[in-house]
Amino acid sequence: MSGFLANKTGVILGVANKRSIAWACARALADQGMRLAFTYAGERLEKSVRSLAEEIEGSLVLPCDVTKPAEIDAAFERIGEEFGYLDTVVHAVAFAPREELQGDFYHTTKEGYMLSHEVSAYSLTAVARRSLALMEGRQGSIVTLTYIGSERVVENYNVMGIAKAALEASVRYLAADLGPRGIRVNAISAGPIRTLSASGVQGFSEILDHIAKKSPLKRNITAEEVGSVCSFLAGPMSSGITGTTIYVDAGFHVMGI
């Protein structure tokens, strides 16, 4: 297949269904010629991920619950056996218990706080560490997904905002660590999109309405727009960009009151 990512390989963590941002990223990468591996966390998501992966020729599908180090090890070992090398990692994994995404932040439980950080933030570091041997010296790219709730108070986003702030700090530290090894690390701060994870945020429809009204483009974004930026960050045109958060939010982040 032709495209600026031909003969490149990548792994996508976090595909849930056709509406997920991770799937839009996968399609954008595949459209440019990249061969992909997909991971899923638990049997509940396996069928959906396998069904989607069938739409992309040459895909590999592997279990990988990021809270289980042995599964991360096994997934990247299999990727190494199958692909031989790795050029791109798309980390689109995030989770917080639904009850933590409503009401006052100070009611956050220790268990909910720790789980959201393990899945949504620490997992990026865990995955980067496992991918290093496959990516080193290949001018590779690690891309993760964040949200403006890391910088501003977004009602009911609560502990996920704190976790995303930790994720963005991790991007900067990983970029410094991995840059000498030829690996770039960046984040995409996507505007709100109707996805499975977004459905857990109370009042999400009101957030969409607010963005459409206040953003410079006077609309919400699409998952495909995020996918396009993901493919850009995976490719040679972004070779000088690392440690950065790129906003794909119709310009909402530049607005004041």
Image (cartoon, helix red, strand yellow):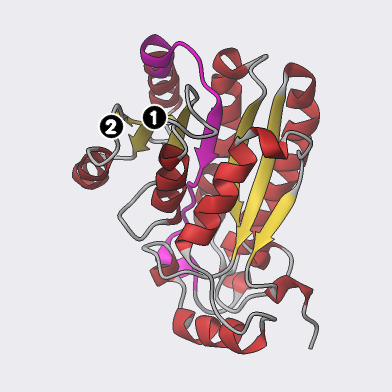
Q: How many labels does the image show?
A: 2
Can residue 117 be seen?
no
- CA neighbours of label 1 inside 10 A, class few (<14), some (14 to 19), many (20+): few
The CA distance from mark 1 to mark 2 is 10 Å
Residue occupying the far front of the picture: 2
In the shown orientation, is residue 47 left or right of residue 253?
left
Q: Residue at x 22, y 38 (%)?
A: 54
Viewer-closest of 135 and 62? 135
Residue hosting label 2: 57
Any magenta on residue 81? yes
Q: Which amino acid does label 2 sit on?
A: Glu
In the shown orientation, is residue 251 left or right of residue 224?
right
The answer to whether residue 209 is above or below residue 26 is below
Any magenta on residue 166? no
Q: Which residue is drawn at 31% across and 56% down?
A: 18
| Residue 153 placement (x, y as % from top left) | 69, 74
| Residue 113 placement (x, y as % from top left) | 56, 55
| Image quadrant containing the C terminus | bottom right
Determine whether the residue tagged by mark 1 lies in a helix, strand or loop: loop
Q: Do the residues labelled 1 and 2 touch (CB within 8 Å)?
A: yes
In the shown orientation, is residue 6 left or right of residue 212?
left
Determine whether the residue tagged by mark 2 lies in a helix, strand or loop: loop
- CA neighbours of label 2 inside 10 A, class few (<14), some (14 to 19), many (20+): few
The answer to whether residue 163 is above or below residue 170 is below
Q: What residue type is labelled 1?
A: Met
| Residue 234 placement (x, y as % from top left) | 59, 37
Could you say which quadrant of the image residue 80 lies in?
A: top left
The numbered dot on residue 137 is none
Residue hosting label 1: 1
Viewer-closest of 102 and 166? 166
Could you say which quadrant of the image residue 235 lies in?
A: top right
Which residues make up the magenta segment?
79-101
